[in-house]
Amino acid sequence: MRRGIAFTIGRIPVLAAVVLLWGFTATPAPAFYKWQGENGQIDLRGFLQTFGAFTVNPEDESFYSHDTDVSGGEVGRLLVLAKRGDHVAFEFNGFQTYTTTTGTLAGLQNAPLIFPQRSAALEWNPIQETDRDARLGVDWMNLRLSSKRVDMTLGRQPINLATVFYFTPNDFFAPFAPQAFFRIYKPGVDAARAEIRLGGLSQLSLIDVLGYKPDPSTANGWSREPSLDRSSVLARVSTSISNFEWGLLGGRVYDRSIVGGSLQGELAGWLGIRAEGHYAAAAPGGLDSLTKVAVDLEHRFENSLTVRLEPYYNSSGYGYGQQVNTSIQTGPLQSMFGAKAYTALDFGYEFSPLLSGEILSIANWIDPSYLISFYSVYSLSNEAEFSLGLSLPIGTGPRNGEVKSEFGLLPASVSAELRYYF
């Protein structure tokens, strides 16, 4: 998921002062409440995230009303973990966000494209305007029951089926964007999940995820009541053979029947290999069958340099540059990574125990266009960190309301975030 306190261009010095003061005064802190008994425990923690961004927009008034924009925001989270022995656990992650910009938050007005498909009954939107937005909701709220061989989790929970890092074709439920670097809190969906241990190195996962119909009148753009015909049922089995973990999955995801697989392991003690993909059958409404596959190759050198290369193929994507206009709606970018072929190349390095950085480039081979992102994290204390990011799109910009390339439609941006855990 990046929202925070409101500010405009004239308030940037104030935000900078707050960031610096917070950074210098942050001290290590345990959970603000912890109870431990003979048969159970309760742990309460908090998280605060403040961010700001400055963007330079493409010169096309059909998509951007200003040459530059400033945005900012804040997100707060309350996290609860309660356990009763080794058999019962309860997890809660509630959030409050506020976002503001000198431009428009048009993407938030088309909520189903950017928010997870889950019930709107646990989300509220007290402020929803073109230039500011406030949200209150629940990301996780679930009960886990465990026995010797089975873990059953019921309720809103993160479902992560990814094996690769960026394009994750098998991560069907609220996946992170490929260019997202901060991935600690994955949004949850309304689901029931059973993890059955078949042996020391084998496991069966049974997953049922509720689906919802689009509803523009709600806070997250989805209906409050589930729709059975949009629900998903999946089974995934995994085992380890020849130092590789192999996975096979199948079932129905929303309106499609799918079958897929994954693998991950290390070759010759040097090259890490991850792969995942699936085939989805044709579906009602004129949806053709499709295939999505991603392969990730990685190596970490002794000096901490990590290199990762990940090509991705999507048979249902647009196949030549002119089709981008049929895939990307007019107005600010509503959907990304809709072409047939991409490649991600990432370099990560630990400059010191406190400072790490990454350079990620994503190439769209169809437009063609490119997105280069720089990201760094500096640890201010055990509980606080500061990150700085830079995003540089390369590609033909829009002209007279017509999209020429996917990444050429994006603004260049510089952003900063302060994150505090307590």
Image (cartoon, grey):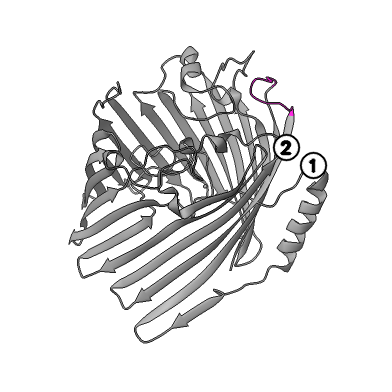
Q: Which quadrant of the figure contains the C terminus?
A: bottom right
Q: Which residue is mark 2?
A: 102
Q: Position of residue 175 (x, y in %)?
A: 42, 43
For label 2, count other residues whose C-alpha is less than 10 Å away and answer few (under 14), some (14-19) or many (20+): some
At 67% from the left and 24% from the top, the residue drawn is: 58
At 57% from the left and 56% from the top, the residue drawn is: 96
Q: Quadrant of residue 152?
A: bottom left
**Does the CB distance between marks 1 and 2 fall below 8 Å?**
yes
Q: Which residue is mark 1?
A: 9
Which residue lies most toward the left here? Answer: 198
Q: Main secondary structure of the magenta part?
A: loop
Please state if 189 lies on the left or on the right of 259 as rendered. right
Q: Position of residue 135 (x, y in %)?
A: 57, 51
Quick check: 278 above or below 160?
above
Q: Earlier in the sequence, mark 1 or mark 2?
A: 1
At 26% from the left and 31% from the top, the residue drawn is: 279
Q: Is residue 307 magenta?
A: no
In front: 267, or 244?
Answer: 244
Please state if 140 lies on the left or on the right of 84 as rendered. right
Kindly identify the amino acid type of the residue bearing the numbered disc 1.
Answer: Ile
Kindly identify the amino acid type of the residue bearing the numbered disc 2.
Answer: Thr
In front: 45, or 184?
Answer: 45
Which residue lies most toward the front here? Answer: 217
At 37% from the left and 74% from the top, the residue drawn is: 83
How much space separates mark 1 and mark 2, taking CA atoms?
8 Å
In front: 153, or 381?
Answer: 153
- In the rendered structure, find residue 320 and report the number of the disc placed on it: none
Magenta segment range?
59-67
Quick check: 52 above or below 86?
above
